[in-house]
Amino acid sequence: MFALVQILSMIAQVIVFLVIIQFIIGLLFSFNVVSPRNEFLMQVYNSINALLEPLLRPIRKILPSTGAIDFSPLVLILAINALIIVLNSAA
């Protein structure tokens, strides 16, 4: 049981890491630090976005529209951290 909790915790941490990477690359594109024509970063961003979109879409449907700011990654990170705490206390 403890090994399963550790594996799930590690997967959750990887998802949080991917959300942070997606956020940073999005900021780099938004503030023109890196051009969106940079093929490598655009492929990384699109790949991470394709992985995270199934997790973020239901959260976006629930949250009210806030305009240009998307709070769904923050809610996902908080939910994953809460899940890690629950799993660790259950083990």
Image: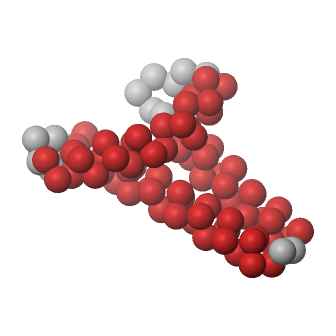
Q: Is residue 40 left or right of residue 83?
A: left
In the rendered image, residue 67, in percent from the top left (x then y), is placed at 45, 22
Residue 82 in view = yes
Residue at the location (10% across, 41% down)? 37
Residue at the location (48% across, 37% down)? 53
Extreme residue toward the bottom, this view: 3
Q: Is residue 29 left or right of residue 8?
A: left
As drawn, 38 above or below 58: below
The quarter of the rendered structure image containing the N terminus is bottom right
Q: Foreground: 73 or 31?
A: 73
Q: Foreground: 19 or 11?
A: 11
When asked about the image quadrant of residue 29, the answer is top left
Extreme residue toward the right, this view: 90
When asked about the image quadrant of residue 55, the answer is top right
The quarter of the rendered structure image containing the C terminus is bottom right
In the rendered image, residue 68, in percent from the top left (x then y), is placed at 41, 27
Residue at the location (54% across, 37% down)? 54
In the rendered image, residue 90, in percent from the top left (x then y), is placed at 89, 68
As drawn, 17 above or below 10: above
In the rendered image, residue 23, in percent from the top left (x then y), is placed at 39, 49
Q: How many marks?
A: 0
Residue at the location (45% across, 32% down)? 69
Residue 28 in view = no
When asked about the image quadrant of residue 50, the answer is top left
Q: Is residue 55 left or right of residue 23?
A: right
Q: Foreground: 13 or 66?
A: 13
Q: Foreground: 26 or 41?
A: 41
